[in-house]
Amino acid sequence: MISLGKNMKKMMAFLFVTTIIFCACTAPQTPTPTPTQTFIQTQVQMSTPTPTYIPSSTGDYLVDVGGYRLHFRVYPGSEPAILLESGGGADASYWDNLAPVLSRKTGATIITYDRAGYGESDLPDTPYDIRKEISGLWRGLEQLRLTNSLIVLGHSYGGMLIRVLANEHPQAIRGMVFLDAMNVEFIDAIGGVEALINHPLSQHFDRSQIEQLTKPQRAALRVEAGLPDSVSLLRTLFIPINIPVRVITAGIPWWPKPEENQYWRESHEHLATSVKDGKLLVAEHSDHFVPDKQPEIIVDVLEELVQAARK
């Protein structure tokens, strides 16, 4: 599966699900902000009929979403809240530099989280179902009372997840940002799901020794197993009308083949033009790692969408 993680070297192409890509990446341009508040680990149990906790200070929350727990990190602010959906294999820590900056610049609540099996979140023993994964995310957000008004940003594989989220809960979505995002058009252009899984950038795990794999590696295999069904579902989904969409694409080619970079750019261009309020922006100074190499373009886009949502 495509992986990010606390260590930036675990983040090359996030291609998608079962690949973990390693590369030497430059340090983020945005300096690490000094925390002004203490992170407190809080558990929110799903059995509570009415959530009793509303985040009022920056902190970490381990939320029971029905059979497993998801770890959320919340930077409190006003509405609309901004949900940052990482690339495949990444956990909440990937946004540790950018999230405080977004909080300060926009005044919005910023939400990051570890998907099932990553970071501090539990790894379910159930098969991967992208729609059920989004349901678990939503249950967690409901318990934190953060479902009223959302702008969602999806990086790489995260772009596929926010499409499902927007289709499941269009009434709550005030804006969408696809950040150099994976998409079905690109997958088809390179030969389909199997071609993506077997891509030269992909690193595969030894399935004969599952017990020796780390939790994130097992989580990656779980997502891979559900990939064909995930893509099939995404083919049926459309972005709900009247949701503003911003598509940020890498300005520096990073796929190995010229035609792959062409397919990548074209898929993003088509996404931006397929919706009523869509706009394509090129991160001229960045490859796939836009949050690290050109974070200002993300800040500018989210500031724009937040201001529009507040009018």
Image (cartoon, rainbow, N blue to C red):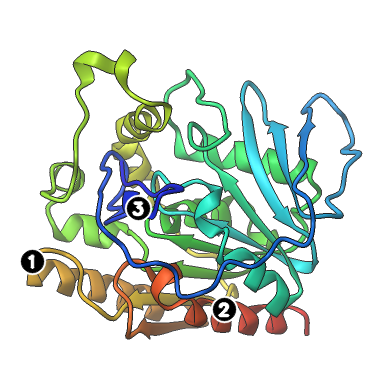
Looking at the image, can residue 122 be seen?
yes
| Between 293 and 258, the one nearer to me in the picture | 293
Classify residue 267 by image quadrant.
Answer: bottom left
Percent position (x, y) of residue 185? 26, 62
Distance from label 3 to label 2 (Cα)?
A: 30 Å
3 or 1: mark nearer the eye = 1
- Please name the residue shown 81% across and 49% down the image: 145
Percent position (x, y) of residue 223? 37, 35
Distance from label 3 to label 1 (Cα)?
A: 25 Å
| Disc 3 secondary structure class | helix
Label 3 neighbour load within 10 Å: few <14, some 14-19, many 20+: few
Label 1 neighbour load within 10 Å: few <14, some 14-19, many 20+: few
- Please name the residue shown 37% across and 63% down the image: 181
| Between 191 and 204, the one nearer to me in the picture | 204
| Disc 2 secondary structure class | helix
Amino acid type of disc 3? Answer: Arg
Residue, disc 3: 235
Numbered circles on residues, count: 3
Percent position (x, y) of residue 277? 52, 82
Residue, disc 2: 299
Amino acid type of disc 1? Answer: Lys
Relative to 254, is 2 above or below?
above
- Please name the residue shown 12% across and 52% down the image: 191
